[in-house]
Image (tube, coloured by chain):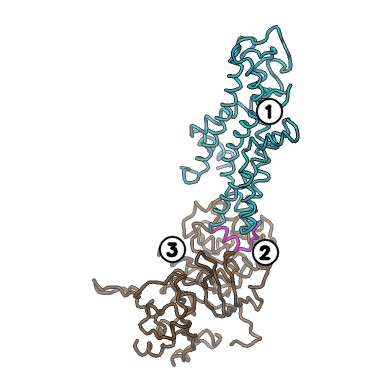
Amino acid sequence: MSSAQTFTRHVQQAFKHRSFAAGAVIVLVLVLSAALSLFWTPYPVADIDIPNKLATASAQHWFGTDSLGRDIASLLLVGSQNSLLVGFIAVGIGLGLGVPLGLWASAQRGWVEEVVMRVADFTFAFPALLSAILLTAIYGPGLVVSITAIGIFNIPVFARITRGAANAVWSRDFTLAAKAAGKSKWAITWEHVLPNVASVLIVQATVQFAIAILAEAALSYLGLGTQPPNPSWGRMLNEAQSQMFQAPMLAVYPGIAIALAVLGLNLMGDGLRDLLDPRLSRTR
Amino acid sequence: MTPAHNTPLLSVRNLRVALQTSHGQLEALRGVDFEMQRGETLGLIGESGCGKSLTALAIMGLLPDRATVSGSIALHGSELTQMSEDTLCTLRGARMAMIFQEPMTALNPLHPIWKQIAEPLQLHQGMDLVSAKARALELLDRVQLPRARERLDNYPHQLSGGQRQRVMISMALACQPDILIADEPTTALDVTVQKEVLALIRQLVAEDGMGLLLISHNLGLMRDQVERVMVMYGGAVVESAYTKALFERRLHPYTQGLFAAQPQLGLKRGTRLQTIAGNVPEIFNWPQGCAFADRCAYVKDSCRQALPPIELVPQMAHFKESQETDKPRQLAEHWVRCPEWQKLEAAA
């Protein structure tokens, strides 16, 4: 069987898993809308149209307009770029630094492991949002600072989970066999340990992605994240707050967008967990 | 002692391993001595926890970090216990190799088998992927894996236990090591497959003239497989002899118990199998002296105070004569760690 056929078969298999399929569709829509908004939005997002402010949903403005007459649909589309960017970079920082740390701790054991894990515990002692607020207090609010803050919070998450999963792999005989074949710790880490912990990391990455989107929304809502005029779901919520009673739907749309994105990622992560778990996989 | 010009392939002297446990520092190997020449086969027998596998891991330098080693392990005269990890890595898989008990878990489930066989070849012989794959095929043919060419790209889960153990063997033999350590290589396999795999190991060891250290708890298996047997109990070698000699004459009470406890074909229905009275002491309960003291009918006070020394026993006349002359004298020596061996022999 060719590898392309195998791939198709795996995809078909995966989509039989209901929560994975649902999650994947939502995430796909999210990615596609972000991609679409790079080329086209119903209205330019920065266009202010005061006479048309707080319009309700209509054929011209699918989701209505906000207090400055901007098109909500366009804002939501462009806002998705922001969420994806935050998710990718924050998870990237977490994976890029946390995974090597976890692998290192697991390969060295002893005091290295102790130090890395205790530092991770220490970082955990501060709630992520709080440390993000602290960072923005020092470096000033902005997208870059908030992404960095969320990313830093991800490092111990990935370090811990990598080290735990890697320790389990190290206790398996094939790592001993690889040692007996003359492989160094680092070669074994790269060739045997990392591939065997990858599935755990993929699942965790989708979950952290969702958390990052939530965190960015929270920071932007507080005015510490994305700055105007760049649209962000969190900031839309913030701006909607003052019109809560005149135009309640202004808060509902970005709220739904955030909830859907998080739900989709979590469902996908859940599905991946099942699909990548060899104990649960039916056929290969 | 072997003369100096004849450096043994492997020489283990007073090997002691202490493990750091929740019960404190415990001595798990209490001074193991042996020597092995090229082409020699040596069996290590004893029950779980007696230190067989620990001996093997110590030789490979694969002991866990919480273990401390003292004594000497020399391969071709170069001391392994003092070697750096990097130097050891160049020897493992190249000069010495190991086969593990569980072929189910000793292969990485994520790599096709040829890649795993190719690993030591790339590492030690600097082969590129293409020639390593070709060599992997030769090796799989050599270990008689049926339809080897189709199986190269298979993953471990597509093979049976016996086939996986063949793959393990081909990995171990890839670089033609001088010494092969097989740690219960057939325990996880069913009986018919066991026989095939053992025959294969025997054949390959003979062909390459390797030294074989075979670890097992199965007496019957030792009989056909190795020239010399060492019986271990409680972290010490209690008896060691030429295999044929040991099967005729057991001098240590533990060895006698071990042989007596073997079920025999043709026993009358209802005959109770013999057992050794008592239990194997846990390592943190090992007595100061002989670990077998509490289960032994011949125990003396001196046995409890200190580990009795191992004594060289005069050989039976017919063994002296029938020995192959080209084998070093040591191979045929009979050693026993029991001060009462003469009494035991008289009783037996």
Look at the image and give the colour of chain A: cyan
Mark 2: which amino acid? His
- Given the image, what chain letter belongs to the residue carrying mark 3? B
Q: Residues within 10 Å of mark 1 (few under 14, many from 20)?
A: many
Residue A82: mark: 1
Give how far across and how far down residue A61 sits, in percent: 64, 12
Circles 2 and 3: CB distance less than 8 Å? Answer: no
Task: Please name the residue shown 67% across and 64% down the image.
Answer: B124
Relative horizontal placement of residue B132, taking residue B311 as reference (left or right): right
Most extreme residue toward the right, as rendered? A139
Identify residue for label 2.
B124
Q: Residues within 10 Å of mark 2 (few under 14, many from 20)?
A: many
Q: Are marks 2 and 3 on the same chain?
A: yes
Please tell me whether residue A70 is drawn above or below residue A163 in the rendered image: above
Relative horizontal placement of residue A64, taking residue B190 as reference (left or right): right
Give how far across and how far down residue B219 sits, in percent: 41, 74
Camera-near label (2 vs 1) is 1
Could one spot residue A20 in this view of the protein?
yes
Camera-near label (2 vs 3) is 2
Identify residue for label 3.
B193
Q: Is A182 covered by the magenta stretch? A: yes
Could one spot residue A80 in this view of the protein?
no
Q: Secondary structure at mark 3?
A: helix
Most extreme residue toward the top, as rendered? A51
> Chain in brown?
B
Residues in magenta?
A173-185
Q: Residues within 10 Å of mark 3 (few under 14, many from 20)?
A: some
Q: Secondary structure at mark 1?
A: helix
Mark 3: which amino acid? Val
Q: CA distance from mark 3 to mark 1?
A: 61 Å
Circles 2 and 1: CB distance less than 8 Å? Answer: no
